[in-house]
Image: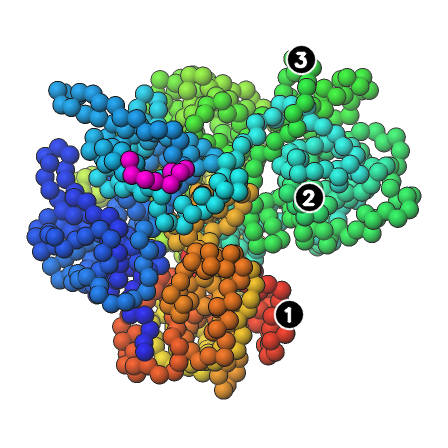
């Protein structure tokens, strides 16, 4: 026997041509130019045994040899073809990948007559119907949807340019939203014909590769040459919908937004009694802050893009979601308070923006004050001043609070402290359970804002409030203010003020979306610029860079005809409340964006703004999204984003003219070299930007060495050296008052701050060889991301509920289940019907020792001939006992050696292939040597971006192996995220 000889769609890249695929042709259509009606070739959607999809193209000159041979649904063997990457400006793509297949004269293409691994009849990349509206402006891709037919399809006949035309209209519903569908001409007729057959009701329809069209302000799905429909398919999504319809869980009703209603108040005792009706609602309670938990660090580092906390791993701060390494991470408050009234005690987490608003200081302000923190471990005295005072606190009630018994709540608003009229201490009462509660332990089950102490990341959601009747009165929303002591007020005035301060119609920038214009935001204008054409002509409209209190940045565009009005309205550096504007998705043509965001704001004639005084609200003066210099070279391969960088200037030339041979003119240039202590990059400023920089240097006396921040620079590579130069939005800051500059200044004096460069080189792929368990556990760093073969006896198979994981149907990476949705962080979207893949934990051994192995999806499917959906249906969602048949059997297994196996000494290894027994073709090792490195081995061995809870202990007995770490597979998704990214 031998290992699986076929590559997967995920493996493909442009490094070679001798790939070997076994795929099904799911859809085939002719490519014909719209204007000339010229036949360009055949297009095919190929699907492999892992449900990976890729578009293939056969040019017209090669189509003769495939005429009559290409059949939809047929399985083929395909090898010796070209893999090309999309340029980025192609439209109407049927598969959302960055690569596609090109047939060449050397391509071998034959029908598969063997009984190989099962390939599904169809594979889809579904979107939620309510996301159709948001993707209407992205013409790069077609879209797959599934839903229940609503109503009866109707045919409309008409004439256009004297030609008889027709269309068929109907609606789909996916339980949450509707979508209009229009099929034109023959395609619509074929749909009606299929509907006349005896079909099961309700009718569930899959539409693959549909085109999103907007006509007369109505968005609908229409047919395209690649489009296919499937009525009551056997696909797992259809089975899931039919099952949800049967148990009445299919239709979901959205709660109305009630942010402007009065918020109900509860005592602490009543707070703990709230039912499921209050999940994701906001409520109020009046409590005294007894003390803060000083055992937990009072601030945390976080990723502003993903809004989650980040950890220091391998001496680098890296976000476990977006994988971005932060040389100078942002910081925010992380405070847990113990609060009480006369009915009980409750732990409450204070959000960063509320702490800043109340104390008027950021985390950086406090850290920079030696009297506040001394050696860094002291709890700041500024924060201690909040203790022993009474507050009206608005809380959000979560699912964990109601269903899972968590007693920790998060404050969304904290009103100014009131005069205390009593102690309100519940400790005088007997048998009070809350009294013995340890706050530091509670934080383990209910995480601080934006972070989860479990490995699930919750997407922030704007909370609803309980609807109640509010007296008709005119109330001005005064926003957030610093704490001010006020005169005594009447009960009515206090109640009205309480409602005003608690209600919040403003949203943060990360929450603004397309589809509406009545947004309200609070922002600071941090930059202004005009774009420049290729000929150097400046555009008449201009751009503003906005920043909010969450450190989220977004570009706002001001069209030419509004320029004069907006320039009178806005001043760079000031804060404003801005209302009524449009939000638009970026398209593939929007290059060189200064912010890693998929949306931008468009100001209109209805846009209004009002300046916010600095004492009323807090937004930082600036924000940067720094890249490590080691990572900047990767940005040179793309043209979508600009980059922020900071470093110490170690070499600087004066302004000088440089001959531009293409234009035949001289350009002014300033060249520099800067470093972050690990790597050097070249800095090149051109034209007026260079002249302004030189004048700045000559006119001011800056502390040496200069520490330079370059915001929104254009990254390139020249003669294998990374450089960053100026572009339209680019600005620079010399010795800027920013925590990154302060940190670099301290590092300069340290001995380990080196100006020498060490370039990392990729490890060559080693020949595949047999290894014993003992040899595998003693590998050094030369084996990171290499593959080896071992022959082992499987002793145990762990039987728990987490024996598979959900996978995104677009990027093929692991996804998470958050707030009722499967969310792909990488693709930034919901995945309504994700794929599901095996991940089985086993203990195996040879004569040299034991080894813990995760059997990934492909080897498990090869062993049993079933996918996860088949097994779920067979075993009704319970652990499949058939997996136990792996026990007490001998297997030859191919292992992937990961970075954690070497650097973290983790003894849990990933199996990418296996077969039963020790008897197989001895030449397979030599054959495997020539197989192309997988995506894992080709990936850059970066630092680990996840936390592992001591999985390297040597466990010998079945009891200790499975009981020492409860539900070990719950930790594996972190490993798989690393492996697959």
Rendered view: 924 above or below 761: below
Q: Which residue lies furthest to the top in this view?
A: 473
Residue at the spot x=26%, y=58% of the render?
23
Answer with mark 3 or mark 1, whichever residue precedes in sequence.
3
Compared across the picture, whether 765 is left or right of 276 comes to: left
Q: What element carries label 1?
A: loop
Q: Position of residue 322 (x, y in %)?
A: 47, 50
Compared across the picture, whether 311 is left or right of 58 comes to: right
Q: Name the residue under label 2.
A: 401
Q: Nearer the viewer, mark 3 or mark 2?
A: 2
Q: Is mark 2 on a helix, strand or loop?
A: helix
Residue at the spot x=46%, y=19% of the render?
607
How packed is label 3: few (under 14 Cα within 10 Å), some, or many (20 or more)? few
How packed is label 2: few (under 14 Cα within 10 Å), some, or many (20 or more)? many
Q: Name the residue under label 3.
A: 472
Depth check, front residue: 726 or 298: 298
Q: Mark 1 points at which residue?
A: 964
Quarter of the image with the N terminus in it: bottom left
Residue at the spot x=80%, y=42% of the render?
345
Rendered view: 486 above or below 209: above
Q: Where is residue 52 in the image (x, y as percent from the top left)?
A: 33, 55
Could you give the CA–CA distance between mark 3 and mark 2, rounded to whole angstroms?
Answer: 33 Å
Depth check, front residue: 941 or 661: 941
Could you give the CA–CA distance between mark 3 and mark 1, rounded to whole angstroms?
Answer: 61 Å
Q: Are marks 2 and 1 in contact (CB under 8 Å)?
A: no
Residue at the spot x=55%, y=43% of the render?
819
**Residue stretch rendered in magenta on the structure:** 196-203
Specify whether residue 216 is in view.
yes
């Amino acid at each position: 026997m031998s290992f699986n000889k076929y590559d997967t769609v995920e493996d493909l890249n442009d490094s070679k041509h001798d790939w070997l695929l076994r795929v099904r042709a799911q859809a085939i259509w002719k490519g014909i130019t719209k204007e000339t009606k010229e036949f360009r070739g055949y297009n095919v959607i190929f699907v492999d045994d892992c449900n990976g999809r890729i578009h293939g193209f056969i040019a017209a000159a090669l189509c003769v040899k495939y005429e009559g041979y290409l059949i939809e649904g047929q399985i083929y063997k395909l090898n010796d073809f070209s893999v090309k990457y999309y340029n980025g400006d192609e439209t109407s793509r049927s598969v959302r990948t960055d690569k596609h297949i090109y047939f060449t004269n050397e391509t071998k293409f034959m029908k598969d007559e063997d009984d190989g691994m099962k390939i599904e009849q169809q594979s889809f990349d579904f979107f939620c119907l309510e996301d159709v509206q948001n993707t209407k402006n992205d013409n790069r891709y077609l879209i797959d949807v599934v839903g229940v037919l609503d109503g009866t399809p109707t045919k409309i006949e008409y004439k256009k340019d004297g030609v008889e035309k027709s269309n068929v209209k109907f609606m789909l519903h996916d339980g949450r939203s509707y979508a209009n569908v229009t099929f034109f001409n023959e395609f619509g007729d074929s749909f009606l014909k299929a509907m006349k057959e005896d079909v099961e009701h309700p009718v569930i329809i899959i539409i693959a590769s549909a085109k999103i069209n907007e006509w007369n302000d109505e968005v609908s799905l229409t047919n395209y040459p690649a489009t296919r429909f499937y009525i009551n398919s056997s696909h797992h999504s259809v089975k899931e919908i039919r099952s949800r319809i049967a148990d009445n869980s299919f239709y979901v009703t959205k709660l109305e937004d009630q942010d402007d209603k009065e918020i109900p108040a509860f005592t602490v005792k009543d707070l703990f009694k709230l039912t499921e009706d209050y999940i994701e609602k906001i409520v109020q309670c009046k409590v005294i802050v007894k003390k803060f938990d000083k055992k937990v660090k009072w601030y945390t580092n976080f990723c502003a893009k993903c809004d989650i906390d980040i950890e220091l791993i391998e001496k680098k701060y890296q976000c476990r979601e977006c994988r971005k390494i932060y040389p100078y991470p942002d910081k925010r408050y992380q405070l847990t308070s113990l609060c009480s009234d006369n009915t009980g005690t409750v732990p409450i987490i204070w959000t960063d923006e509320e702490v800043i608003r109340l104390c008027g200081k950021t985390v950086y302000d406090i850290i920079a004050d030696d009297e506040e923190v001394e050696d860094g471990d002291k709890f700041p005295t500024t924060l201690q001043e909040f203790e022993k005072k009474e507050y009206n606190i608005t809380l959000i009630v979560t699912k964990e609070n109601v269903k899972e018994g968590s007693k920790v709540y998060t404050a969304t608003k904290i009103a100014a402290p009131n005069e205390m009229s009593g102690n309100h201490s519940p400790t005088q009462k007997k048998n009070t359970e809350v009294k013995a509660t340890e706050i530091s332990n509670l934080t383990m089950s209910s995480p601080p804002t934006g972070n989860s102490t479990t490995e699930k990341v919750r997407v922030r959601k704007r909370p609803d409030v309980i609807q109640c009747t509010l007296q008709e009165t005119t109330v001005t929303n005064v926003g957030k203010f610093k704490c001010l002591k006020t005169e005594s007020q009447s009960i009515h005035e206090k109640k009205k003020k309480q409602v005003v301060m608690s209600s919040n119609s403003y949203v943060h920038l990360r929450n603004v979306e397309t589809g509406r214009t009545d947004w309200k935001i609070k922002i600071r204008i941090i930059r202004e610029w005009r774009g420049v054409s290729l000929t150097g002509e400046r555009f008449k409209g201009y751009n503003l860079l906005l920043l909010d209190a969450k450190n989220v940045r977004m570009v706002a565009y001001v069209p030419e005809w509004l320029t004069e009005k907006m320039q009178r309205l806005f001043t760079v550096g000031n804060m404003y409340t801005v209302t009524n504007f449009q939000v638009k998705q970026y398209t593939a043509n929007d290059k060189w964006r200064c912010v890693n965001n998929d949306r931008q704001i468009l100001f209109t004639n209805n846009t209004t703004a009002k300046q916010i005084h600095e004492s009323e609200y807090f937004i930082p003066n600036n924000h940067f999204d720094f890249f490590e210099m080691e990572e900047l070279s990767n940005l040179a391969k793309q043209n979508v984003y600009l980059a922020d960088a900071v470093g110490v200037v170690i070499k600087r030339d004066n302004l000088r003219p440089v001959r531009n041979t293409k234009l035949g003119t001289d350009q002014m240039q300033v060249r520099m070299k800067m470093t972050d202590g690990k790597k050097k990059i070249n800095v090149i400023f051109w034209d007026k930007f260079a002249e302004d920089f030189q004048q700045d240097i000559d006119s001011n006396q800056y502390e040496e060495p200069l520490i330079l921040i370059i915001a929104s620079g254009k990254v390139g590579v020249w003669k294998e050296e990374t450089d960053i130069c100026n572009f339209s939005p680019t600005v620079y800051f010399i010795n800027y008052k920013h925590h990154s500059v302060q940190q670099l200044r301290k590092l300069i004096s340290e001995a380990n701050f080196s100006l020498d460069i060490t370039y990392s080189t990729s490890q060559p792929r080693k020949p595949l060889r047999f290894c014993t368990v003992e040899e595998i556990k003693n590998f050094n760093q030369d084996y990171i991301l290499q593959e080896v073969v071992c022959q082992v006896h499987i002793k145990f198979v762990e039987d728990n509920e987490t024996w598979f994981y959900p996978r995104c149907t677009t990027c093929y990476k692991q996804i998470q289940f958050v707030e009722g949705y499967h969310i792909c962080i990488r693709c930034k979207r919901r995945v309504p019907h994700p794929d599901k893949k095996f991940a089985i934990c086993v203990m195996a051994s040879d004569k040299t020792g034991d080894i813990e192995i995760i059997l990934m999806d492909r080897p498990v499917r090869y062993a049993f001939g079933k996918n996860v959906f088949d097994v779920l249906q067979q075993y009704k969602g319970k652990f499949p006992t058939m997996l136990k048949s792996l026990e007490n059997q001998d297997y030859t297994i191919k292992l992937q050696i990961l970075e954690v196996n070497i650097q973290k000494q983790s003894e849990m290894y990933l199996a990418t292939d296996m077969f039963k027994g020790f008897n197989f073709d001895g030449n397979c090792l030599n054959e495997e040597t020539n197989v192309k490195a997988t995506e894992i081995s080709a990936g850059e061995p970066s630092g680990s971006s996840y936390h592992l809870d001591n999985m390297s202990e040597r466990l010998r007995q079945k009891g200790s192996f499975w009981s020492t770490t409860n539900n070990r597979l719950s930790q594996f998704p972190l490993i798989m995220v690393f492996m697959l990214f």
